[in-house]
Image: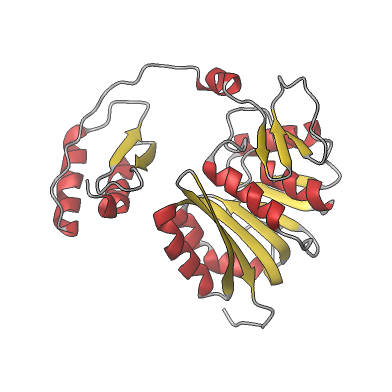
């Protein structure tokens, strides 16, 4: 489908599959959307949704097809393909690394596993570079929202020795985060909780000096007001999980709540935004 209509077609496909991804080359005008499901999806229903989306967007109806994927041990493949990663002053390595952390680097032991966040993805790399670029330590506690493996929480704690609350809605992610916190001997600084966004008793009405959220564009836009309420005046927010073309609308959603752009980092087609909250009080 046309690249500009990619988001609309992705949303149309979502009800029929478990997960959706869409890709397009930087200079391309067309995009391809892929949905993954554990069972055979209803191709006729998908085609009806595509036709309705084409009519709504004024585009030609894209061709849809269903194919069975070869079963792979993605975890084993990931572990084999996970060499140490340099992200600014951070050095992220897995369980099988037997070398020495380079001088002047901050080592983070984050084994490749079933949870997102090992540093090799463009969005995680961008967040790590954003954390590394911040010169001022966050006041009080920091928050890693949608923490996954807790790699960002660990990076924040490692850099500033500041307490970090790591939150994720997925119990598997939180269990993995807790394992990584133990492996990095960071239990005195980082704590992981299961939380559906900002609505959790341990978040409550607290404000944080730094909030990192490596999620996706749509939920980041929906949660912009919550993030602004929980970010202390003068605090920084590091947001990613954004395709480059999604960055302007995410930035605009947060600008409406008093967060201004401080830095923009692009890695392999993914964008990370570093925003700063105004010191002025604002009514929400």
Q: How is the image coloured?
A: secondary structure
Query: Could you say where residue 170 lies in the image, as x and y percent from the top left?
Result: 58, 40
Residue at the (75%, 61%) spot, across then down: 135
Query: Could you say where residue 88 lies in the image, as x and y percent from the top left?
Result: 69, 45
Query: Could you say where residue 246 lies in the image, as x and y percent from the top left?
Result: 42, 57
Residue closer to the observer: 139 or 146: 139
Please identify the quadrant where the C terminus is shown: bottom right
Query: Could you say where residue 277 lies in the image, as x and y percent from the top left?
Result: 64, 72
Give left or right: position of 222 versus 104. Answer: left
Q: Say if 135 sits above or below 260 in the image.
A: above
Residue closer to the observer: 137 or 56: 137
Residue closer to the observer: 36 or 202: 36
Residue 169 in view in this figure: no
Q: Say if 192 sits above or below 206 in the image.
A: above
Residue closer to the observer: 92 or 230: 92
> How many labels were placed on the picture?
0
- Which quadrant of the figure has residue 83? top right
Residue at the (78%, 40%) spot, across then down: 105
Please identify the quadrant where the N terminus is shown: top left
């Amino acid at each position: 489908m046309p690249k500009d209509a990619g988001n609309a077609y992705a949303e149309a496909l979502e009800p029929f599959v478990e997960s959706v991804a869409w890709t397009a080359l930087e200079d391309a005008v067309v995009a391809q959307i892929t949905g993954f499901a554990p069972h055979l999806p209803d191709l006729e229903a998908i085609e009806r949704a595509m036709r309705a989306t084409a009519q709504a967007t004024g585009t030609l109806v894209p061709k849809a097809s269903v194919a069975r994927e070869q079963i792979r041990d993605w975890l084993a493949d990931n572990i084999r393909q996970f060499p140490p990663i340099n992200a600014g002053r951070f050095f992220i390595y897995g369980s099988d690394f037997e070398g020495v952390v380079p001088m002047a680097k901050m080592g983070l032991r984050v084994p490749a596993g079933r949870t997102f966040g090992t540093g090799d993805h463009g969005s995680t790399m961008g967040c790590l570079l954003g954390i590394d670029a911040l010169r001022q330590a966050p006041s009080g506690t920091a928050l890693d929202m949608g923490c996954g493996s807790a790699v960002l929480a660990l990076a924040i704690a490692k850099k500033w020795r500041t307490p970090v609350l790591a939150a994720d809605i997925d119990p598997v992610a939180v269990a993995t985060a807790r394992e990584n916190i133990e492996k990095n001997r960071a239990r005195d600084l980082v704590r992981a909780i299961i939380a559906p966004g900002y609505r959790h008793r341990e978040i409550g009405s607290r404000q944080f000096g730094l909030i990192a959220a490596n999620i996706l564009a749509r939920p980041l836009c929906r949660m912009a007001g919550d993030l602004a309420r929980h970010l202390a005046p003068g605090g920084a927010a590091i947001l990613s999980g954004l395709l480059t073309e999604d960055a302007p609308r995410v930035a605009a959603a947060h600008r409406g709540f008093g967060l201004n752009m401080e830095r923009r980092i692009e890695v392999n087609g993914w964008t990370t935004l570093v925003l700063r909250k105004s010191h002025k009080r604002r009514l929400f």
